[in-house]
Image (spheres, grey):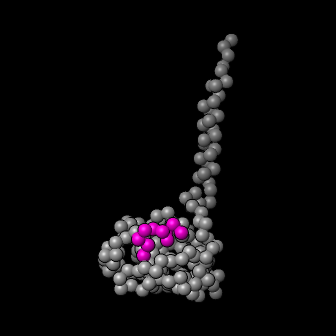
């Protein structure tokens, strides 16, 4: 009688282990979310540079009463252009502050001139140092801040479609309800 090698069982065992790992990964709450170390902490300092002719964003503005948004964006960023109409609509409801990331001033101003300016105030981050301090991985990223300047939520990616309605909007509504 021929003996079956124990190594013959290895491929089905490896396959079952991989299938189990993939199944677990697909059933996580939010598999695409990268946790932010900033949530629950005071917002890092903002640079004192701004675009010509724009209101400069200050640290004091981030600590004023009420919920506010801080959006890291750039004119060279296609997803930033995609989310721009959402920021325009949000700016009618609450303060939206912008941090222009590693951009050329003329390009950023042309972008805002063409598509509208949703930002109550703007800071510029030409070297990306502030983005690092905030934990920004790539624009666009939007932070929800409370009236004391604490980060309540970080949203990586554009504020569009189901990602906006299912992930960002519930967090914003929760923040607005908590302020009342």
Residue 79, by quadrant, is bottom left
Q: Residue 172 versus residue 144: which sits nearer the camera?
A: 144
Q: Is residue 104 visible?
A: yes
**Residue at image coords 35%, 67%:** 76
- Side of 8 where 139 appears, left or right: left
User: Measured along the vertical axis of the image, is residue 16 above or below residue 55?
Assistant: above
**Residue at image coords 59%, 88%:** 65
User: Measured along the vertical axis of the image, is residue 116 above or below residue 29?
Assistant: below
Q: Where's the C terminus, which quadrant?
A: bottom right
**Residue at image coords 53%, 82%:** 59
**Residue at image coords 33%, 78%:** 109
Q: Where is residue 9 shown, x and y percent of the image?
A: 65, 28
Q: Residue 138 versus residue 127: which sits nearer the camera?
A: 127
Q: Where is residue 33 shown, x and y percent of the image?
A: 57, 61
Q: Is residue 170 visible?
A: no
- The residues colored magenta run 124-133
Q: Where is residue 30 shown, x and y percent of the image?
A: 59, 60
- Side of 2 where 62 appears, left or right: left
Q: Where is residue 46 shown, x and y percent of the image?
A: 50, 77
């Amino acid at each position: 009688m021929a003996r079956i090698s124990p190594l013959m069982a290895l491929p089905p065992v490896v396959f079952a282990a991989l299938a189990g790992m993939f199944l677990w990964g697909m059933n996580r709450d939010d598999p695409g979310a990268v946790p932010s170390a900033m949530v629950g902490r005071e917002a890092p300092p903002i640079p004192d540079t701004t675009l010509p002719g724009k209101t400069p964003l200050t640290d004091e503005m981030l600590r004023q009463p009420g919920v506010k948004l801080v959006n890291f964006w750039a004119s060279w960023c296609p997803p930033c252009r995609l989310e721009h109409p959402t920021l325009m609509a949000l700016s009618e409801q609450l303060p939206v502050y912008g941090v222009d990331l590693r951009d050329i001033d003329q390009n950023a101003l042309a972008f805002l001139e063409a598509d509208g300016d949703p930002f109550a105030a703007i800071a510029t981050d030409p070297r990306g140092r502030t983005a690092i301090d905030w934990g920004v991985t790539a624009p666009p990223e939007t932070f929800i801040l409370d009236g004391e300047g604490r980060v309540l939520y970080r949203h990586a990616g554009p504020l569009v479609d189901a990602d906006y309605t299912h992930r960002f909007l519930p967090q914003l509504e929760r923040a607005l309800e908590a302020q009342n």
